[in-house]
Image: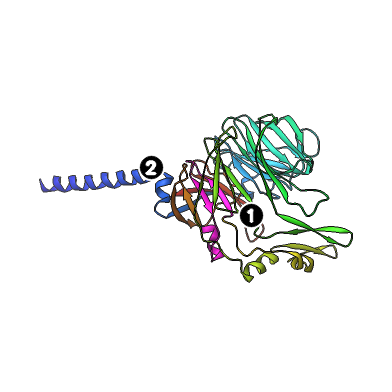
């Protein structure tokens, strides 16, 4: 009888253990954020060994996946998009170098709908709409006067959101125009629903020409799209987030208190060290004297430096911290209604890259190792 009793106790314990873990695995991201930490787990890597012998990664920037988990890598130096299945097996390349239909020159970004691939074909200055087989449906030429595409996101109804930035040519004392449009799957512009003037650069006269001088820590526009198609936008001059519907109509907004971080001399040194310059026809690392002299720093940093929307519609806002090394490791989490959840610490070996899209708790990022080899890494968000 005692053996049976012990067996029953053990069985109950085992059942409770697995039930508890099953419950934890079923926790929403919202509940996980409330604990103040998440863990980002590396699942697998796509690298040179994943490619055929005659195919290589020459570059990689924007990495996106579709509803089936297929992975699309914009290789802008190879002038193609590389396609992999959900397990990382190479399928094919889409496009080839050139200027004709279906040809690419520096494909820089991609948005993926149920039926379309929308590619920002930067070197050819056009947007290309292709079907899922990579066949061209339509191209839309983009002039610098129209504004240069900066970021694209697909909507669940098949439309595409495209943010662009336009400079005032010949008017160096004017700010840049940042605007966000909704396009149909066949690249018909449906609506411009957001505009904002920003100061990313200023143009300073040097002799008979104007030099582009970056404006460090100037407020910018950050945005992302939820799985339901809500467009979440923040202009970092203040900590205010606006939410627009799938049709571009404003739904709501929310604000959050924050402590502004001062710009330090160390911030200035790091900024100048990150800029490349040319001397005698050769590129060198570090800003030249003209940039150092003419760059203008504000006294405080903007309210935040990135916005992400996760698989459940929660809004993740990455801010600035006194310890710059910690900035990629923390974010403010809000639910889909804008209610503050917690300041969350990221555990693991990665934060969220700016171009990443979080779906089904998964996102992808590109890394280059010490030998210069490109790796495309799949990560999962966990408790």
Q: Of 351 and 207, which appears nearest the observer?
A: 207
Relative to residue 255, is residue 191 depicted above or below? above
Give the secondary structure at mark 2. Answer: loop
Q: Can residue 318 be found in the magenta stretch?
A: yes
Q: Position of residue 353 (x, y in %)?
A: 58, 51
Q: Residue at x 44, y 46 (%)?
A: 339
- Label number found at residue 133: none
Q: Position of residue 227 (x, y in %)?
A: 52, 37
Q: Residue at x 46, y 55 (%)?
A: 344
Q: Position of residue 120 (x, y in %)?
A: 71, 40
Quarter of the image with the N terminus is top left
Q: Which residue is mark 2?
A: 26
- Residue sitting farthest toward the right: 208
The answer to whether one can see residue 174 in this image is: yes
Give the secondary structure at mark 1. Answer: loop
Q: Of callouts 2 and 1, which one flags the residue occurring earlier in the amino acid sequence?
A: 2
Compared across the picture, whether 127 is left or right of 328 comes to right
Locate residue 139: give its quadrant: top right
Q: Of 215 and 252, which appears nearest the observer?
A: 252
Relative to residue 326, is residue 130 depicted above or below? above
Disc 1 packing (10 Å; few <14; some 14–19; many ≥20): many
What residue span does the magenta drawing correspond to? 304-329
How many marks are shown on the rendered structure? 2
Q: Which residue is mark 1?
A: 219
The answer to whether one can see residue 383 in this image is: no
């Amino acid at each position: 009888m005692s053996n049976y009793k012990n067996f029953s106790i053990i069985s109950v314990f085992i059942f409770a253990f697995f039930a508890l873990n099953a419950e934890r695995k079923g926790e929403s991201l919202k509940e996980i954020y409330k604990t103040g930490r998440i863990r980002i787990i590396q699942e697998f890597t796509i690298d040179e060994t994943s490619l055929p012998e005659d195919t290589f990664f020459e570059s990689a920037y924007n990495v996106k996946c579709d509803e089936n988990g297929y992975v699309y890598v914009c290789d802008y130096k190879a002038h193609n998009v590389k396609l992999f299945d959900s397990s990382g097996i190479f399928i094919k390349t889409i496009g080839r170098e050139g200027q004709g239909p279906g040809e690419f020159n520096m494909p820089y970004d991609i948005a993926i709908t149920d039926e379309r691939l929308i590619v920002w074909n930067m070197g050819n200055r056009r947007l290309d709409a292709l079907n899922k087989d990579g066949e061209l449906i339509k191209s839309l030429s983009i002039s610098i006067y129209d504004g240069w595409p900066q970021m694209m996101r697909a909507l669940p109804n098949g439309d595409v959101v495209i943010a662009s930035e336009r400079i005032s040519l010949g008017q160096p004392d004017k700010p840049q125009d940042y605007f966000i449009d909704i396009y149909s799957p066949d690249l018909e512009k449906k609506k411009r629903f957001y505009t904002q003037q920003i100061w990313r650069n200023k143009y300073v006269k040097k002799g008979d020409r104007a030099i582009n001088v970056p404006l460090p820590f100037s407020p910018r526009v950050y945005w992302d799209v939820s799985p339901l198609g809500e467009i979440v936008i923040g202009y970092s001059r203040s900590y205010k987030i606006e939410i627009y519907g799938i049709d571009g109509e404003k739904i709501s907004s929310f604000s959050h208190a924050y402590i502004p971080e001062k710009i330090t001399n160390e911030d200035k040194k790091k900024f100048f060290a990150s800029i490349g310059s040319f001397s005698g026809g050769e590129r060198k690392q570090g800003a030249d004297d003209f940039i150092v002299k003419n760059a203008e720093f504000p006294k405080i940093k903007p309210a935040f430096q990135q916005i992400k929307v996760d698989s459940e519609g929660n809004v993740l806002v990455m801010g600035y911290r006194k310890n710059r090394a910690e900035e990629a490791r923390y974010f403010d989490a809000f639910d889909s209604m804008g209610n503050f959840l917690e300041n969350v610490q990221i555990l693991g070996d990665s934060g969220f890259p700016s171009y990443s899209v979080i779906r089904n708790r998964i996102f992808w990022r590109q890394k280059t190792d010490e030998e210069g080899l490109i790796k495309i890494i799949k990560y999962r968000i966990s408790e």
